[in-house]
Each structure stands twice: as structure tokens, then as C-alpha cells.
Amino acid sequence: MNRHLDIRAVSFDVGGTLIEPWPSVGHIYASVAAQFGIPPVEPEDLNRQFGSAWKARRDFDYSREAWRELVNASFAGLSPEVPSRECFDAMYDAFARPEPWRIFDDVWPTLAAVRERGWKLAIVSNWDERLRPLLQKLELIGHFDAVVVSHDVGVTKPSPAIFQRVAADLEVPAETILHIGDSAMEDCHGARSAGLHGLLLDRKGRGTEPDAVRSLAAVLDFVAR
């Protein structure tokens, strides 16, 4: 990446970038399922099947029914039956609350550093109607000048349209925005297709992009001081 960039704003993905399920998706699923009489399921097994189902998803529209199919796939073969509608609703509602989420340690210092440079801050996320209230409960939303959620705009990353929307909301040219996220396709390629700069946050060191950072703390090193 050219480090001499005219950056005026930084936008962030949310899941895997700013926050993560805690202790894990599998732990939350297993805990809620137990409340509805489902025999104990190992969280690690649920995490494994959820991860496989998430990678295999196609045309995922972040609707409630799409999430239910993902939950069913996570439990398939691990319990005598998939979670009931009531059980799924409880799982869905659980992730709308702040308790199952953890803000990464590098988030607050990075947001402060971006602000110190006088740049604007934004969120661009594929999510459903739960995101804005969740960000409010996590005391994150007030730190951003624009929040663009696929549920609200009717288009998901990597579509250029969702990135063009954030440029319009921030009132800055697309080429002056650096977008950061944990998906090479949705975040990096999507942002670049709309004229933004895209940077991969590769927290686990998968090495899928030549230009990537392992922590948000390293983001500013990619831009000339």
C-alpha cells in the first residue's frame, strides 16, 4: 500500500474488527440451548460447525430466517433436534445484548489516535437491525460520524454501493477514506471497488493479503505521519 495517502476518514467493519462474541458463539448457543432443555453440547463443536456454515453461506441476507438456518446448521448432528423457534428467538435476542460481546483492546486507542489526526470515523457493516442498539449499549456508536448498516441501506459488502454511501454520509471523497476489516473480499476488495483504500485486519495471521495488519494499533503505520 502507498503510505503517502491523503486520508481524511477511516471506516471500520464491526464483527471481528471492533468486537467479537465472548467467550464464543458456541458458548452462547450452548448456554441458551440448555435453558430450553437441549442436552449439553460442547461449545467447541458448535464453534466448529458454525464456522463451517458461515464459510459456506451464499447470498446471506442477514434476515432472521437466514440466521435461524445458520443456527440449525450449527446444531445439526450435535443434538437430537435443532433448536425450537422459541429457543432460536432467545439466541437471537441474546446477541442483541452487550454481555455476549467483547470490544477488542486495540479499539479505543485506535479511535483516539484517528481523532487526534482530525480524521472522521465511520462504520460499514453487514448486520441486521440489532447492530445500532448494540453499538449504543456498548457505548461505541457515539464515537462515529457515520454508521452504515446493510440492513438499513438494502445492500451488503462487497457491493460498491455500501461504500459509496459511507463516502456520501461522511461528505469526503471516496479516495480519502481508509476502510479496515477482517474480510479480504467484503472489506478490502469491496472498498477498493468503490474507490476507497482497503486494509485487511488479519488478527490470526492467515496471510491472505500482502498488505495486512495484525492489530488496529498498526493501522496508522500504513499512512504517512
Image (cartoon, grey):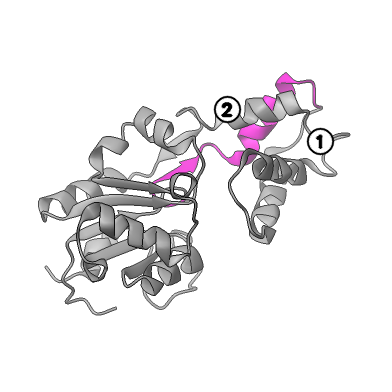
Residue 86 vs 223, above or below: the answer is above
Q: Residue at x 63, y 30 (%)?
A: 91
Q: Residue at x 50, y 56 (%)?
A: 156
Mark 1: few/some/many CA within 10 Å (<14, 14-19, 20+): many
From where the camera sits, is residue 128 visible? yes
Q: Does 129 sit left or right of 166 as displayed?
A: right
Please state the extent of the stretch shown in magenta in the rendering. Answer: 16-38
Q: Position of residue 125 (x, y in %)?
A: 43, 51
Q: Does 223 sit left or right of 46 as displayed?
A: left
Mark 2: few/some/many CA within 10 Å (<14, 14-19, 20+): few
Callout 1–callout 2 Cβ contact below 8 Å: no
Residue 24 vs 174, above or below: the answer is above
Q: Quadrant of the C terminus?
A: bottom left
Q: Position of residue 28 (x, y in %)?
A: 61, 32
| Circle 1: residue type | Val
Q: Quadrant of the N terminus?
A: bottom left
| Circle 2: residue type | Asp
Q: Position of residue 144 (x, y in %)?
A: 26, 44
Front one among 7 and 216: 7
Q: Which mark is residue 93?
A: 2
From where the camera sits, is residue 212 visible? no
Compute the Cα span from label 1 to label 2. 17 Å
Q: Residue at x 19, y 53 (%)?
A: 120
Residue 127 vs 193, above or below: the answer is above
Residue 182 forms part of the magenta stretch:
no
Front one among 131 and 194: 194
Question: If you read the primary sequence from the N terminus, does the residue marked by circle 1 or circle 2 appear first?
Answer: 1
Q: Which mark is residue 82?
A: 1
Q: Does 7 sit left or right of 72 as displayed?
A: left
Q: Residue furthest right?
A: 80
Picture quadrant of residue 174: bottom left
